[in-house]
Image (cartoon, coloured by chain):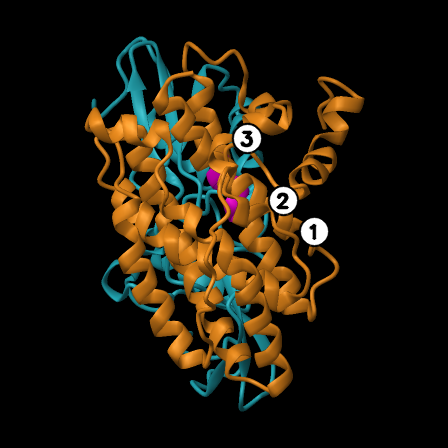
Chain colours: A orange, B cyan
Amino acid sequence: MNAKTKFLLHLADNPLILGQRLGEWCGHGPVLEQDIALTNTALDLIGQARLLYQYIAGFEEINLNEDSLAMLRYEHEYYNLLLLEQPNKDFGHTITRQFFYDAFNLIQYEALSHHADETLKAIAIKSLKEIKYHYRYSSEWMIRLGDGTPESHAIMQQAVNTLWRYTGEMFQLTTYETELIQSGDGVDIAGMETPWRDKVNDIFSRAGLSIPSVEIMLTGGKEGRHTEHMGYILSELQYMQRTYPQMTW
Amino acid sequence: MAATAPSHIHIKRKQLASLLHEVSDPEIPVVSIVDLGMILHIRDEDDQWEIILTPTYSGCPAIDVIPFMVEARMKEAGINDVKISMDISPPWSTDWISDEGKAKLLSYGIAPPDGTSSLRGDDGKPKACPQCGSSHTELISRFSSTPCKAAYRCLDCLEPFEYFKCF
């Protein structure tokens, strides 16, 4: 598989897996409004993933349609960030995961919306409008809960401490990303760590949260090496297509 | 793009446009897909017309239903050779909702988007409560029954209502 296809799959798998995770909140949100907010965000994310899968499905080397790309690959063929497959746990944990990703995605999609590939550029411009909104939502909740009651603060700090070790992967170049940068079609994600940190520091200072000292960052998702959670996500995501192949609504 | 249909096509652009006005948004039936600004082009393609639609939000559940509804409306009117496609560029904006569409939203109880999203760069605020007209309102949630709306509450009449966000 060429570097560009791999990179696009990585971009598509991120919102698919996070969208699937957020969908698990459906009917279980802490209050009705937040249940709706999380599932609306899931819809946006799955819509963004779909635009990318539709594009990839048109490539000659890909022998799968958009549905098969989403539903019928094996675990090691998904290239999403480890962060996004982490369990929802509580609302604060879900919001923290969302905030880390939204802050990064805002910077990444800003860059992608100037990409030389016209289709990718159009998808990025469309998605960026939604990502901005997601960021506004998740950063507001970081502040509200981080700066809330002693209990909400403790839950948020615990979520930050648990999830921080998955944030380093966002800025680590894979071989396919390096190859694309060398050929002039890449995005310098390594250079996005500083602006991302600025956003995090800004929100954390208002939320009263602190960055934990974590020495080791966990990586591998972008190259198909996942945490134990991924298999469970896929077994639910793929259940219908595996049990009743080719089924449609 | 030709201003009128070539002679070999008996269907007029105007006829297509008026049929599109009759296709309601599946989730907010008071407005048509034309009111919402979801028609990017009506194009004269050699031997057939092409209608190019654009989705509001990329994950809007109506995304697959609307082309189907357009096709059904065309067939009902006896037009079978229209191609219907989707494009996401330029991205849809609430700036494209017509004044008529905004008035219909308001009468339906949904506060229309206030201001021009491209200029504001945020989702804006409802100008007034659609029930009592008070400008004294507060945000309940940034998301509501569909991705395009936020939930608000009127602080005077106390009615909750939906606001179509600037986007």
**Callouts 3 and 2 close, C-beta under 8 Å:** no
Amino acid at dot 1: Glu
Kindly indicate whether the residues beneath marks 1 and 3 are on one polypeptide chain: yes
The residue lying furthest to the front in this view is: A215
Q: Is residue B57 left or right of residue A112?
A: right
* Placement of A98 over or under A111, stated as above or below: below
Question: Is residue B28 visible to the viewer in this orientation of the structure?
Answer: no
Labels 3 and 2 positioned on one and the same chain: yes
Looking at the rendering, which quadrant does residue B65 occupy?
A: top right
Determine which residue is flagged by label 1. A24
* C-alpha gap between disc 1 and disc 3: 19 Å
Please give the residue where the numbered disc 2 appears in the rendered image. Answer: A20
Q: Residue at x 33, y 59 (%)?
A: A196
In the image, A62 versus A3, the foreground residue is A3
Label 3: few (<14), some or many (≥20) within 10 Å?
many
Q: Residue at x 40, y 22 (%)?
A: A5
Chain letter, disc 1 residue: A
With A167 as the anchor, is B145 left or right in this view?
A: right
C-beta proximity under 8 Å, tags 2 and 1: yes
> Looking at the image, is B43 positioned above or below residue A163?
above
Amino acid tagged 3: Tyr
Q: Name the N-terminal-most of marks 1 and 3.
A: 1
- The residue segment tinted magenta is A44-49
Read off the chain for label 3. A
Question: What is the secondary structure assignment of the residue under circle 1?
Answer: loop
Q: Looking at the picture, how far across and down is residue B94, in whole percent? A: 36, 55
- Predominant SS along the magenta part: helix
Establish whether labels 2 and 1 are both on one chain.
yes
Q: Amino acid at mark 2?
A: Gln
Quadrant of the image containing the N terminus of chain B: top left
Q: Label 3 belongs to which residue?
A: A78
